[in-house]
Amino acid sequence: MPLGMLSDRYGRKKILMSAGISGGIIFMLVPVAGTHFWWTLVLLTIAGGLVGSFFSLGLAYAADILPKVLLPAANVVASFHFTIGSIIGPNLGVR
């Protein structure tokens, strides 16, 4: 999905918020698809396209709002958050 182009045009914060909300809603619709393989595949593809570029789009947003001196620290913090979310998220989803 061209989220980078959309964020250049409409603003990164608006695109991040709308992609996060839309992706969350679509992820919540996955159980409704039940055992229908194709519906599940379509829903996961769309949701993954919406939330899959959060890391890079978030760093671009940080570059917009932070001074250049703080960008390396923002990258490190974003990497920690991404790693922690990748470890904790699946474990929370199982329960």
Image (spheres, helix red, strand yellow):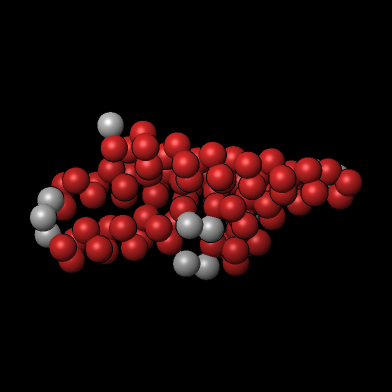
Left or right relative to 7: residue 31: left
Q: Residue at x 63, y 42 (%)?
A: 80
> Residue farthest to the left?
35
Left or right relative to 62: residue 1: left
> Residue farthest to the right?
69
Q: Residue at x 69, y 41 (%)?
A: 77
Q: Residue at x 47, y 67 (%)?
A: 1
Image quadrant where residue 47 sits: bottom left
Image quadrant where residue 83 sits: top right
Q: Residue at x 54, y 39 (%)?
A: 84
Quarter containing the C terminus = top left
Residue 6 in the image: above or below residue 32: below
Q: Nearer the viewer, residue 90 or 28?
A: 90
| Rendered location of residue 18, percent (x, y) | 48, 47
| Rendered location of residue 17, percent (x, y) | 52, 44
Q: Nearer the viewer, residue 70 or 81?
A: 81
| Rendered location of residue 61, percent (x, y) | 68, 50
